[in-house]
């Protein structure tokens, strides 16, 4: 995007004068329509220059309301509109009223975290772009002979928007392009710990009291190979306990929250398959935590999809749900959605079919073959002796791959086998798994 802009002496914010259903937050950079689907007009706090782009990010949408955000310009100074706002809150205000010009964003772009910009040229044509891509002229006819204020009608399915500056826009497009690729196909499961409250949409988990106990949340479906699961930290605190997360073969629908242990690390003592990780990384409000699992059982965790904070192995031969213990310095967590990165986009056959989910606990003899073993060797047999049936899991990688005798031998100091036969990660302990 190549634009000629005037020198801006102050960042763009929303004007203190706005419609009755609008609330301003974050130093007047966020406008939120708190009820209804109309009466959502908001203005810039200063005039906009010719060719000066207005950068907007959609923060929140509702899927059960028709209509989307409208944007444009007005020649009327909002400071003098306080008593006249109700006269042009019609959805057609942009074309029906003298001195207002605007048009709705296309439905396909009115999605959460869509970032777009618009500006007016000296001929009165309003240009716009989506996620740094120039889309051309959106509409025309704007009178550019006087001052112009940006005007947004936060209407219909669009509930909240943020004004961004050029530098924030460029940074986000460069550093976190995954925000524009999200698929909203996953939520928190309705079953959760007693110290967690979910919002009505089940996409936000909130810790009730500052404690690491019983703050469990789960994904409402199994994790799929090669997809990346994105969560965002919405609120933090100064509590010093670490954030715990992991995967489990246990369908959350079968869980009784009251029977879950207080300490997340004790989950590995349950009969089901659990892998629990202690995240010592300090997160800030607004950070994104990205999880992915590939077809070899390698789980990667990263902050803002930029740098890796953890990598571990899991038994990928059975359905796995993600779980997150909302604790530590994280007090509110939103499950954003999933996306497939560019490097794996060409091989997504495994994403087309979700693993079969059964109401019962996972069976002892799954039919898939163990990764890293011979194609002729069934995973029901021990990965070391290849004779006895598997009934022991390796800690901390989590692979279910040892029989009783080999598990005992592995833990003896004189044994030559001290590494997981599946992934090669050092063995810290083994746990017997009961059918």
Image (cartoon, rainbow, N blue to C red):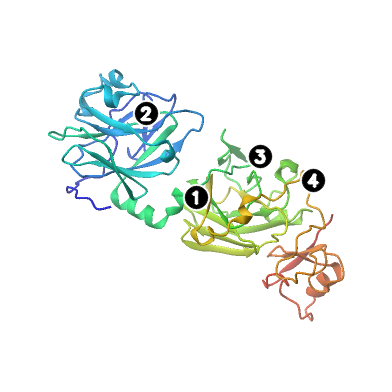
Q: Badge 3, how many Cα within 10 Å: few under 14, some, many 20+? A: some
- Disc 4 element: loop
* CB under 8 Å between discs 1 and 3: no
Cα distance, mark 1 to mark 4?
40 Å
Residue position for label 4: 360
The mark found on residue 22 in the picture is 2
Horizontal side, residue 235 vs residue 96: left or right: right
- Residue 435 spot, x, y in % from top left: 84, 54
- Residue 112 spot, x, y in % from top left: 45, 41
The mark found on residue 238 in the picture is 1
- Residue at image position (41%, 40%) is 109
Cα distance, mark 2 to mark 1?
31 Å
Q: In this orientation, does residue 379 appear? A: yes
1 vs 4, front mark: 4
| Residue 390 drawn above or below residue 50 | below
Q: Badge 2, how many Cα within 10 Å: few under 14, some, many 20+? A: many
Cα distance, mark 4 to mark 3?
23 Å
Return the disc, 2 or 4, that comes first in the chain's sequence. 2
- Disc 1 element: loop
Return the disc, 1 or 3, that comes first in the chain's sequence. 3
Return the disc, 4 or 3, that comes first in the chain's sequence. 3
Residue position for label 3: 194
Horizontal side, residue 203 vs residue 246: left or right: left
2 vs 4, front mark: 4
Q: Badge 4, how many Cα within 10 Å: few under 14, some, many 20+? A: few
- Residue at image position (59%, 44%) is 186
- Residue 42 spot, x, y in % from top left: 31, 31
């Amino acid at each position: 995007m190549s634009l000629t802009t005037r020198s801006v002496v102050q960042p763009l914010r929303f004007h203190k004068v706005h419609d009755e259903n609008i609330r301003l937050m974050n130093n007047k950079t966020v406008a939120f329509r708190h009820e209804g689907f109309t009466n959502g007009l908001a203005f810039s706090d200063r005039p906009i220059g010719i060719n000066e782009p207005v950068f907007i990010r959609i923060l929140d949408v509702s899927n059960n309301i028709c209509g989307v955000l409208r944007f444009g310009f007005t020649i009327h100074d909002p400071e003098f509109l306080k008593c006249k706002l109700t006269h042009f809150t019609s959805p057609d205000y942009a074309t029906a009223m003298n001195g207002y010009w605007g048009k709705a964003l296309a439905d396909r772009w009115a999605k959460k975290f869509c970032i777009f910009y618009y500006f007016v040229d000296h001929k009165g044509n309003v240009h716009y772009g989506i996620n740094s891509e120039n889309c051309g002229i959106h509409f025309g006819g704007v009178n550019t002979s006087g001052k112009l204020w940006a005007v947004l009608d936060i209407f219909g399915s669009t509930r909240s928007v943020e004004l961004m500056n050029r530098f924030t826009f460029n940074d986000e497009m460069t550093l976190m392009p995954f925000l524009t690729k999200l698929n909203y196909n996953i939520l928190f499961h309705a079953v959760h710990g007693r110290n967690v409250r979910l919002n009505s949409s089940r996409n936000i988990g909130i810790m009730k009291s500052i404690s690491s106990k019983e703050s469990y949340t789960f994904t409402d479906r199994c994790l799929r190979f090669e997809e990346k699961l994105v969560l965002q930290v919405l609120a933090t605190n100064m509590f010093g306990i670490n954030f715990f997360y992991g995967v489990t073969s246990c369908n959350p629908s079968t869980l009784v929250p009251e029977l879950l242990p207080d300490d997340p690390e004790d989950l590995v003592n349950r009969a089901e398959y659990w892998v629990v990780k202690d995240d010592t990384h300090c997160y800030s409000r607004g950070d994104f935590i990205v999880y992915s699992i590939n077809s070899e059982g390698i789980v990667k965790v990263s902050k803002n999809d930029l740098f890796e904070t953890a990598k571990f192995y899991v038994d990928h031969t059975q359905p796995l749900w993600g779980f997150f213990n909302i604790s530590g310095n994280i007090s509110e967590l939103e499950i954003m959605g999933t996306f497939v990165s560019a490097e794996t986009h060409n091989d997504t056959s495994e994403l087309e079919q979700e693993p079969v989910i059964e109401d019962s606990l996972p069976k002892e003899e799954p039919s898939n073959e163990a990764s890293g073993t011979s194609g002729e060797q069934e995973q029901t047999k021990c990965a070391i002796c290849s004779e006895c049936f598997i009934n022991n899991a390796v800690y901390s990688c989590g692979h279910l791959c040892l029989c009783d005798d080999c598990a005992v031998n592995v833990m003896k100091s004189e044994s030559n086998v001290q590494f997981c036969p599946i992934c090669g990660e050092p063995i810290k302990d083994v746990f017997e798994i009961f059918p």
